[in-house]
Amino acid sequence: MKNSLKAVIYPINKEYVEILKYKEMMEKYEEIIPVCLSGQGIEHRDAGELVKGKPLGIEIMADFEICMQDVDDIIFTEFSDVVFDKMMYSIEHKKNIVCLFELEDEMNRTITGKCIENGVHFKNYCDSYAAYDMLKEKKIKEMNVPILLICGLSEYTNKFEVQLRVRDEFKKRGYCVSQIGSKKYSRIFEMHNFPQFMFQNIPEIDKVYMFNSYVKQIERKEHPDIIIIGVPGGVMPYDMDHPNGFGIVNYLVSNALSVDGTLLCLAYNEYEGSFWEFITDYMQHRYEYSVQSFHLANVFHDIYGDERNEGERLVYMKQKKVDEKIASFDGKKVFNINNEETFRKEIDELINYLTN
């Protein structure tokens, strides 16, 4: 049975539109009200417009104090002095606090103490699970269910949204899904967070064993039909100025697990005919990832800018442009999650591949 809580999400920006778009997957909130920072210039717009998507029927608001009056939770997306003041104000007005970002220990204690003092709850979805014992033995254990990876050629490829849609489609077809999400706050969608030990200053070989153990313990506890894993970062550098993490996290994962299938997410861009063979071979030889299909995002990542726009920027494309670009790839296995027909066709083929 779904809960009927109401929440404010503050401050809203492009990255968090997916929380509004897929709130039903959280099975917690009946309504989430997006509130922007003062001066952003996006108030009273439909939230879907921020990412050039379909209208969501959710208006972006600007008055935090008014919007928070009739809600249960305040979901904070970032930390600053302004946000901290809003957080303290919310606690004093008996609102539960939810964080989607990491906090220093001292600040965490401050917020926790303030919440206890006022009789409200505090939840940080970036916290890691402490229940998993990560390194009982240095041994790679095989999984008994298929492993599906969702990776990105680079950042800004709609990778997390693809993870949400793929999981939802598998569950609609009756499969029990365990999932590790690529976002630090993946747990808000009832996933597991990608473990923070993969980014800590510990030996790389220990990370491989620990990640294998992490996934194996999820398999043993949840008995899924499939495990879907979203991998943070990109699979290869653009150049030395834009390394995309050098694919290091993917390399560690590839050593920790035998992967059964991969969806590779691409930013909106021109891709020459030789690209498809090159990237498929690259993924197979570097990671032993077999790529089943490609997702084309509606985001163009302009890493160099131009005379008018210095530095990196993101350009969101309308769905018509994305569909036209996919059609130009001449029969390549490329899809977009907002085209329902091609998306479901890809899931059909993926299920057939993983079950045969």
Image (cartoon, rainbow, N blue to C red):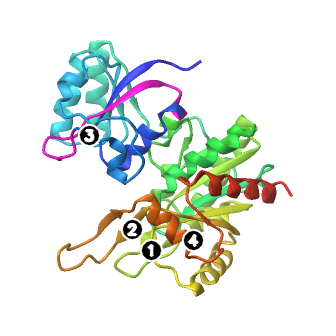
Which residue was labeled with disc 2?
300
Which residue was labeled with disc 1?
269
Mark closer to the observer (4, 1): 4
Q: CA distance from mark 2 to mark 1?
A: 6 Å
Q: CA distance from mark 4 to mark 1?
A: 13 Å
Which residue was labeled with disc 4?
327
Mark 3 touching mark 2, by CB under 8 A?
A: no
Which residue was labeled with disc 3?
11
Which residue appears at 20% of the width and 42% of the height? 80
**Residue placed furthest toward the left:** 39
Q: Give the number of callouts.
A: 4
The one nearer the camera, 36 or 120, is 36
Amino acid bearing label 3: Pro
Which residue appears at 18% of the width and 24% of the height? 65
Mark 4 touching mark 2, by CB under 8 A?
A: no
Per the image, label 2 sits on a secondary structure element best described as strand
Q: Which residues are magenta?
A: 25-43
The one nearer the camera, 139 or 52, is 52
Mark closer to the observer (4, 3): 4
**Residue placed furthest toward the top:** 119
Q: CA distance from mark 4 to mark 2?
A: 17 Å
Q: CA distance from mark 3 to mark 1?
A: 30 Å
In the rendered image, which quarter contains the N terminus? top right
Per the image, label 3 sits on a secondary structure element best described as loop
Amino acid bearing label 1: Asn
